[in-house]
């Protein structure tokens, strides 16, 4: 199974800086045995694409999508529009969208299904809040979010989906979830997929860990069975740091 590392710039870098990031990252020595993607703001997709030229690494990812086809949805962007840009992955249900934009489990499910239909790999983010973690509710919340998110996916689709376990208390806090604990949660996600979809999909699904990943801790996660890559926020903003992180994750 090839590992996947996704840089999540969040709301950083308009077109000018996005182009610069891509050009700088292209100068990095990158491992060949790993997949790398970068999730850029919608307005920067064209600049990122132009700076990539014919290069296919990093793959382009979007940070959000709307579930409808073309229509009266002012301000929204459809999966087929992202497809026109050559976007290969799109985050859905990031905790910042769930908490700040009020995104519900049902909305996440509709977005994931729309992406899959358009041939774009949904990267479905799930994670418990600090309060839920303290109350010992992690597995329950993860089961709920996972069950809801896969409800509208097509088991026969050729387009895979990816999960990212991102404990909310760990995002941007410098407090990474211990790798063994993350592995247990990844097993919960895989278990739900096996039960609700099938064994084959559960075996193949990539489950990333996200939350305060940096150059010093990435290797520990990627050598833990059941963790198939990482979603990286803060440590992806500098292209050289993210390049180093990719090399540290998977020396070629
Ligand atoms: C994220 O926002 O997806 C994330 C994992 O952020 P950070 O790496 O900064 O914790």
Image (cartoon, rainbow, N blue to C red):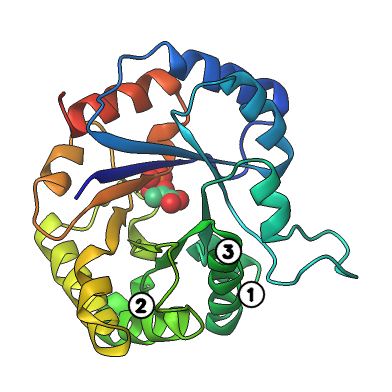
- Is disc 2 placed on a helix, strand or loop? helix
Q: Nearer the viewer, mark 2 or mark 3?
A: 3
Whether residue 135 is visible to the viewer of this picture, yes or no, is no
Crowding at dot 1, Cα within 10 Å, few <14 / some 14-19 / many 20+, comes out as few
**Closer-to-camera residue (196/12):** 196
Q: For mark 3, what is the residue?
A: 115
* N-term-proximal mark, 1 vs 2: 1
How many numbered marks appear? Answer: 3
In the rendered structure, the answer to whether residue 59 lies left or right of residue 208 reads: right
Query: Residue placed at 59% from the left, 17% from the top?
Result: 20
Query: Residue placed at 65% from the left, 50% from the top?
Result: 83
Residue contact at pointers 2 and 3, CB within 8 angstroms: no
Residue 240 location (% of width, % of height): 38, 18
In the rendered structure, the answer to whether residue 66 lies left or right of residue 142 reads: right
- Is disc 3 placed on a helix, strand or loop? helix
Q: Which mark is residue 102?
A: 1
User: Which image quadrant is residue 14 in?
Assistant: top right
Crowding at dot 2, Cα within 10 Å, few <14 / some 14-19 / many 20+, comes out as few
Q: Nearer the viewer, mark 1 or mark 2?
A: 1
Q: Marks 1/2: CA distance? A: 18 Å
Whether residue 90 is visible to the viewer of this picture, yes or no, is yes
Query: Residue placed at 28% from the left, 29% from the top?
Result: 245
In the rendered image, the vertical position of residue 199 relative to residue 96, given as above or below: below
Q: Marks 3/1: CA distance? A: 20 Å
In the rendered image, the vertical position of residue 239 relative to residue 216, given as above or below: above
Q: For mark 2, what is the residue?
A: 131
User: Which image quadrant is residue 191 in?
Assistant: bottom left
Residue 46 location (% of width, % of height): 71, 32
- Is disc 1 placed on a helix, strand or loop? loop
Query: Residue placed at 25% from the left, 25% from the top?
Result: 31
* N-term-proximal mark, 2 vs 3: 3
């Amino acid at each position: 199974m090839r590992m996947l590392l996704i840089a999540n710039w969040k709301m950083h870098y308009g077109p000018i800086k996005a182009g610069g990031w891509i050009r700088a990252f292209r100068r990095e020595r990158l491992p060949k045995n790993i997949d790398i993607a970068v999730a850029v703001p919608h307005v920067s997709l064209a600049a990122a694409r132009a700076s990539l030229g014919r290069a296919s690494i990093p793959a382009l990812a979007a940070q959000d999508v709307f579930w409808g086809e073309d229509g009266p949805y002012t301000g929204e962007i459809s999966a087929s529009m992202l497809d026109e840009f050559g976007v290969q992955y799109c985050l859905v249900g990031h905790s910042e969208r769930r908490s700040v934009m009020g995104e519900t489990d049902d909305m996440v499910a509709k977005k994931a299904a729309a992406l899959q239909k358009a041939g774009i790999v949904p990267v479905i983010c799930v994670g418990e809040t600090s309060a839920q973690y303290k109350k010992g509710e992690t597995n329950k919340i993860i089961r709920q979010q996972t069950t809801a998110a896969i409800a509208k996916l097509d088991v026969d689709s050729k387009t895979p989906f990816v999960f990212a376990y991102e404990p909310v208390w760990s995002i941007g806090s410098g407090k990474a979830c211990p790798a063994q604990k993350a592995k247990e949660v990844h097993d919960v996600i895989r278990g739900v997929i096996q039960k609700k979809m099938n064994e084959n999909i559960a075996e193949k699904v990539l489950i990333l860990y996200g939350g305060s990943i940096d150059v010093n801790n990435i290797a520990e996660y990627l050598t833990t069975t059941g963790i198939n890559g990482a979603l990286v926020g803060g440590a992806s903003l500098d292209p050289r740091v993210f390049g180093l992180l990719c090399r540290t994750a998977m020396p070629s």
